[in-house]
Structure formats: structure tokens, C-alpha cells
Amino acid sequence: MALPAQPTPLLGRGRELEAVRELLLTEHVRLVTLVGPGGAGKTRLAVAVAETVSADFAHGVVFVDLSAATAASEVAPTIARGLALPDLGSQVRMDRIARFILDRQLLLVLDNFEHVVAAAPQIAELLADCPELKVLATSRAPLRVRWEYEFALGPLQLPPPSVDGRAADLAAVPSVSLFVARARAARPDFSLTDQNGAAVAAICRRLDGMPLAIELAAVRIKLLSPAALLARLDHRLSLLTDGARELPRRLRSLRGALDWSFELLTPAQQSLFRTLAVFSGGFSVCAAQAVCRESSPEDVFDGLAALVDQQLVQVRYGADGDSRFDLLDTVHEYALERLSEAGEVDDARQRHAQIFLELAESSEPRLASGARDDCLRQLDLEYENLRAALTWLVEKGSAAQACRLVGALCLFWVFDERVGDGRRWVERCLDISSAHEVGMARAKALQTAGHLAWVQGDNNSARRRLKDAVSVAHEYEDRATLAVASLHLAFVLEPEGDATAEGERARLLDEALQIFREVGDDWGTARVLLADGQIALDEGKRESGRRTLEQSLGLWQRVGDAWFTAHTLNVLGDVARAEAMYDRAFDLYSRSLALLRQQEARTSLASVLQNLGYLAFQRQQQPEAVRQFSEALDLFSAQADYRGMAECLLGLALTLDSVGRPSDAARLFGAAEVLLASAGAAPWPINVEPVQRARAHTRMLLGDARFAELAAEGGGSSLARVLRLVRETVDSLSAPPATRTTPLTPREQEIAALLARGYTNRQLAETLVLSEQTVETHVKRILGKLELHSRHQLAHIQIPT
């Protein structure tokens, strides 16, 4: 049979075409199987490869479509018909075909082999008997014979997020080029533009880069804009229909393609497949075995291997060589439908939630230790499953399990820098719970809510939640939660010189310390000492605070906790900086920074960089201060940490004030105030004095009205605009002196320098041999260019040169 004509060119598969062609023409390669899921374009690629190599086979290429064969016994007769053999009847055997082919140099293309793989040994026999024969097969599962070379045909290349919707960047991306070509076939006036590019790219990503899905979606451009089509892809299996009528039924719709694959599975494999729909973000073999408890681990393993073979499950290998499995989004949606049809959703999702609750609770002790790195990696890998479990528990109103899960994840959210997401989840769980209903689990959830609020600088919320946590923990005699809640509550109390409140702080810390020491928990003891030391600093008890912090540091080093060691070094750096021991502060901050860079702890790293910025400013190293603040700001903004961002803006503002940029400084002061208000926070105590001094100086230079106007401008700007201003400022301050520009002419710079030294107009006129009227004109221009309202302000700024 001749190769079937193709109505459209092959798009987006140039590299695959060349790779398969090269493999097929390799002398010792006799059988190549293109393996991929339904709709991946296996047939189209096989035909294209066959066209390019036909001249390399003296007796040509024969194409055989096996989709109509219903059993392995029908494969040989179907091949015989493709070879145009004389009618040998329905019982034709492969040896008769072998005698016909003999020494012919022939390429045999066997399309759609997946449902008749039992006939694979017959193909192996044919290859053994015909030394010049080569076979190119397509199948959703490998043939599993010794001759075989598998070539996995995955999705088309997707647009990277960095292209950001620009048509010029998207046009050459294989998945996008296929969508555009098929869309134009349906609607000739369609074109890819900067306006619709982002939506087209998102469509290709949502459809996993699968050619069939993209082609079916592109047809809908006749009725829907790309944005409208994207909005409807939550129900893609119902939307993506209406394939060409001449195609097999299984390729006329996305659901048809998946039905064909599903029906090839055994009942046990079908059950496993639909159960795997409860996972989100991938899963391990052990997790699959745990969810499918009614099956033996061996049966689940074998079933998973079969699903991988059928291209319904994807397998990926991590850097450590461990395998992880996943379903493409479209396949996942189909599996969920099948799970729902079978009435198994509730049972499967409850087992899934229980598994990940057990994972979180077993991980909690390791998070509270110096050996948390592996644990963090595992929880990070399973984060989408943890979120899916929380979603299910909240939807079902399973308050006790939901509160247990968020309580167990408290330290994970802190160390993995997901504090904002953690706060949202814990508040949702608290909304569906009550102390009477869930008891100790609620106490722990309240403690988590308070801890996360405190980390974000929201002390009002933290105080409220932690007081409730202490109360509920006392009621249910949950001493572990009581200890942690007490130490954090001590942090957020605001004594402000109130001896009673200070006594309450001390009582809370003593209670926490006693509990941890009773159970021999050095890690918990070190946390209390760290809190005690920081609180002592806040209360102005610097010497006792330092001693307590050094005790805490020794314990952290003993238990081997690098993160808390770094954090404590950072706080001790603050102490040294407050005492103007700048060299010691730099040493402590640098040691902390080195530890945090090793751990890639971005938020903590940003805090130390910010402190180094303030230290550089205090050492009058303005360029270094700007560099540190800028790097810290980028890290804080990536985490949406408003308090940290505000601290950096304040640091940049006081630096700008010191180099004669009062207008920019005022804008940043205003922006920082808004961010602090959003976070419900205040500047760190150690930074309050230099910030207040710089703010007052900026106000003095500009005058009250102008300062208020510029601060309001900064506070009313979007975050993106503020960050753009910062980048422009950093660039201008970082430029080499030779490339900097100044608004002043050389003569104006000379006059400004003399004005700064206190020269009067008459003295300037005499010194420069100018008229007093000319001098007055110069002075007005200088003040206007530098945005000053008084010549006396020149004495307090650095004159631009």
C-alpha cells in the first residue's frame, strides 16, 4: 500500500523527523517504534519519515494501517493485503509473507499497533527471516521485542514564559506555529499578534502541546477569539470535538482519542488509572501504592508500568535518579471524569488526603531539627498534593484533619518561604473549625496562624491568634503547642514600658523554656533563648540580650541547624551595628550570608543583605549600600514580602538623601510608608533612628509642602512604578563617574560649591568677576535644577559634578 497523502505539511517536528530518519537508516537498526499518546502525531511523523527515506529502499515503502485489525491473528492478513499478495485467505501466516519478501530491501510502516501488540513476536520472526527488511511502527505502547528501538514522541515544544506574548518570539515555537496554521485554515484572516499572543501561548500550554488537541482547538477560532477559547478550556474534553470527518472516530475528538487508549486497558489497569487522578503535581510509586490500598504493591507497580507504556502516565527522573510520575493536564481531566463516573471520588480523595496528612505529620519533627533539608525537598516536591489534600478536607468540612495538616506544615511554610500561602490555608481551616469540635488540632492551627502572621510582620493578627492558641492549648493540656505559642506571643506583646506586660512576656518565655527543658528538646530551648535575646534587645537590654543570643547560637551549632545559626548571627550583627562596632557587625553578617547562600534561603538572605545595606550606609559606603538594598529588594519583591520591601526602600531613601537626591528620597519614604501600613508593621527598631534622621533632613531640604507632595506621589504609585524608579535610581548611582550627567553647567557647579561654603552674592560677584544680577540669575537656576527652595540647603547636600 502506498503512503497516504497528507492534506497539510508536518509542523513543529523537524528535529524529531531528522532523528528518526537517522535512526532508521542506521545499518544495524531493523525496527523503530514511534511511541506516544493518542493525538501526538505519530502517524503523521511516520509518513513524513517514510517519504524522506523511500529512495534509500530499493523496493520502496509499504504502509499498513492496523487500526481495523481486531485481534493479533488479523495482523498477518492485513500486512498481506498491504503488500498486495495474492488472496491467501484469512489464515495467512507470517512465514508466507516472509517468503514473499525474501531479500527485498523494503521499509514496512505498521501504523496503530497498540491494540494488537500480542502480534509483536510475529514481526520479530519476519525481521529474522528477511535480512533486508526494516519496520517503522507506531503505537501507544512499545512492542517489547528484542529488535525494537523505541522513539518516544512527546508533546510539541511549548512557548517559554519569558516570551510574554510577543508575536515575533512566539511564531517559531512549534506548538504555536501549528495552532496558527490550523487556525488560518479555519479562518483565513486570523493572524498571530502581540495582542492575542499571550492567549495563544496559554492555550498551547493548557493543551500540553499535544498536536491533536491543538488542532481541534484551532478549529474553534471560527467562533471564538483566543482569549474566549482559553476561558473555556476548563472543559476541554467537551469543547475539543469536530475533527475532520475522514479521520477515524478516535481522532475526531479529544475524548475519542482517550477513550481508545482507556479501552485497551485491563479492568485493573482502568481502576488504577482513574484513581491516579486524585494526585496533583505528580506522585511517587509509594504514593500510588498507598492510595490503591485494595491492590497489592506489586500489582500497582505492574499497572503503573502498563500505563507508562500506554503513554497515559508520564515518567520523569530527578537529579537523584528517582522516578516520578504524572498525568498530562488533559489526561488528568479525563481520568477525573472516569473516577467520577465510577462513583469512587470520595473514597480515593479521602485516602489521598490521609496519606499526605501522614507525610506532613511525620515530617514535622525533622523540620524542627538541623536535618530539615531533605524533608523540605520532599514536601516541596509534594506541595501540590498537600494543597489538593487541604482543598478536599476544607470542602468536605473535615476540620480536625485540616487543622492537623496546617499545624504540621507551619515550619515548612516558613522555611520554604510560602508564608503568604500558608496564612491563607490556615485561616480557611480555622473558619470551618471550633475548639469544641477539634480541640488540640485547633490550638496548633491557631499557633500556626499566629506564627505566620508574626513572620509577615502582622503583629495585631499574630497577637490575637497566639492568645487564642495559648488559651486552647491550656484547656486541652497540649504542652508542646503551648510552648511554641507562648514564645511567639512573647514576641508580639507590646509592653512599651508597662512592667505588667513585661512580666507577662517573661512568664511566657519561662513557661516555654521549662517545657522544652523538661523533654530535653535542645532545638526548642534554643528557639526560646533566641526569642528571649531578641526581646531583650527590643527592650533596650543590650548586654543581657547579647549573652542570651550567644547561648542560643551555641545550641544551634550543637544541633547542627544552619538556618537558625545564620539567623542568630544576623541578630548578633544587629547588636554590633547598634553599638557602632562596624567591623564586628560586618563579620557576623557575612558569616550569616554565607550560610544562607548555601541554603538558597531567599527571604532570610534578603534580610541579611538589607542589614549589610544599612551597615554600608553607616560606614559611608553609599554605592555598596545601594547594591545591597537593591539585591535585597529584588528578593523581597519576589516573595511579595511588603515589610522587607519597605525596609529596603527606607534604606535606599536615606542613602539618596545623603547623596543629594531629596526628591527621589521623599518618593521612596512615601512608598515605604504605604507598604508598612499594608503589612501592619513598623521599621525594625535598630533602623528607626537613622531613618527618622534622614526623613527629617529630606523634609528640611524640600520644605514641608514639597516633601508631603512627593511622599504622596510615591505612596500612590503602583508597586511596579516604584520598583522601576528604584532600578533607574540604582543605575544612575552605579554609573561610572565619567558617564554621570549633572543638571548643572560647569560654571553653575563652581557657583554651587561656593554657595555651599556660605558665599554671599557680593562675594561671588567679586570672586568670579560677575555682576550681582548675573550671580542672582545663576543662583535661581541652580536652586531650580536641584529642586531646592533655599541656598542654605546647599550646605547639606553633595553637589553633583
Image (tube, grey):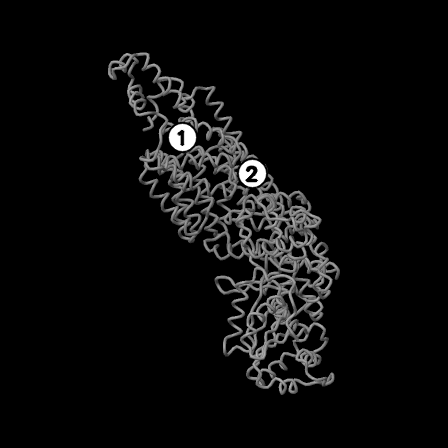
Q: Looking at the picture, does residue 438 appear above or below residue 752?
A: below
2 and 1 marks in contact (CB < 8 Å): no
Q: Is residue 481 visible?
A: yes
Along the line of sight, the residue nearer the viewer: 490 or 328:
328
* Residue 378 numbered mark, or none: none
Q: Could you tell me how far apart the alpha carbons at marks 2 and 1 are, in whole angstroms? A: 30 Å
- In what quadrant of the picture does the C terminus appear? top left
Q: Looking at the picture, does residue 236 appear above or below residue 714?
A: below
- In what quadrant of the picture does the N terminus appear? bottom right
Q: Where, by quadrant of the figure, is residue 748 drawn?
A: top left
**Mark 2 or mark 1: which comes first in sequence?**
2
Q: Disc 1 residue type?
A: Leu
Query: Helix, strand, or loop for circle 2?
Result: helix
Categorize mark 2 by other alpha carbons within 10 Å: few (<14), some (14-19), many (20+): many
Query: Helix, strand, or loop for circle 1?
Result: helix
Q: Residue 176 placed where, x, y %?
A: 59, 54
Q: Where, by quadrant of the figure, is residue 67 drawn?
A: bottom right
- Name the residue tied to disc 2: 462
Q: Disc 2 residue type?
A: Ala
- Name the residue tied to disc 1: 654
Along the line of sight, the residue nearer the viewer: 571 or 302:
302
